[in-house]
Amino acid sequence: MKLHVSPDTFPPRGHEAKRISIVDAAAGVFCREGYAGANIDLIAAEAGVSRQTVYNHHGDKEKLFVAVVRDLTERCNAGIFATIATFPDQPKDLEADLIGFAVRLNQNCICNRDGKFLRKLIQTEGERYPELFAEWLEQGPGRTWPAIAARFARLAYGGYLAIEDPDVAARQFLGLVNAELQTTFMLGGTPSEDEVLQSATNGVRTFLRAFGKRRSVTSVEKQAALAGT
């Protein structure tokens, strides 16, 4: 059954506001129904515009899908870079400060609506549009991961961490701090604040065991250890 929505039913909005409304509605529909199950009538109804308005802005369903992925990538990048700006370059308590950063990264960039939608589309539609998601890989992680790696390089240069390859360290950090959230993500849920904190805490502690600055053992400590054997 087709849904007929009169453009006069809703208050007038500017061109950009309508575009954002359409993209937001389309993201939700594509994630919920899948690309094959989504249709312009449903997207128009959820956006509060006429189907012709959707066509005027995006042409057809495929072009709208591409616009959704690109828009979500830009938004997620903005959130990640804003969070990277809070990275603890001169930490007072390295573990606590990295945990705080990891929590912000998870909450603002991974567990939020845009992050959930983008992750779902990558997982479910990646094979359908390999070139589009190759573009996402370049414009998303290809830009944000090096920025995080540069921050870890500063910590290593400052003597806080023992890192040979900042790129590897950044990828390990990102994988560890949300590792315990993956099951919730796969089931379509949203982790609680306690779960986000626990995952960040465990991830950072594991990260520091691998990359934390190792203190030299003093001769007194060596003698004490030998005396105890």
Image (spheres, rainbow, N blue to C red):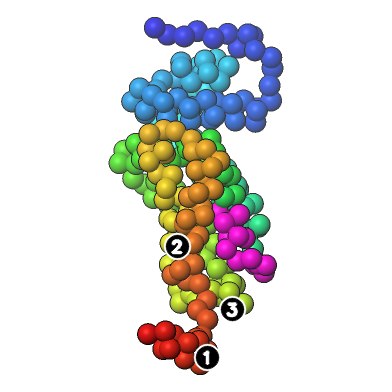
Q: What stretch is highlighted in magenta?
A: 89-102
Measured as percent of width and height from the top left, residue 61 is found at 42, 27
Amino acid, disc 2: Thr
| Extreme residue in the left direction | 127
The 10 Å Cα crowd at callout 1, few under 14, some 14 to 19, many 20 or more, is few
Q: Which of 115 and 209 is in front in this view?
A: 209
Check disc 2: other Cα within 10 Å, few if <14, some if 14-19, many if 20+. some
Question: For the residue marked with disc 1, what is the amino acid?
Answer: Val
x then y, percent, for residue 179:
41, 50
Seen in the picture, residue 9 relative to 77 is either above or below; the reply is above
In the rendered image, residue 79, in percent from the top left (x then y), is placed at: 60, 47
Q: Is residue 41 left or right of residue 229?
A: right
The residue that label 3 is drawn on is: 159
Residue topped by disc 2: 206
Q: In which quarter of the image is the N terminus?
A: top left
Residue designated by label 1? 220
Question: Does 101 appear in magenta?
Answer: yes
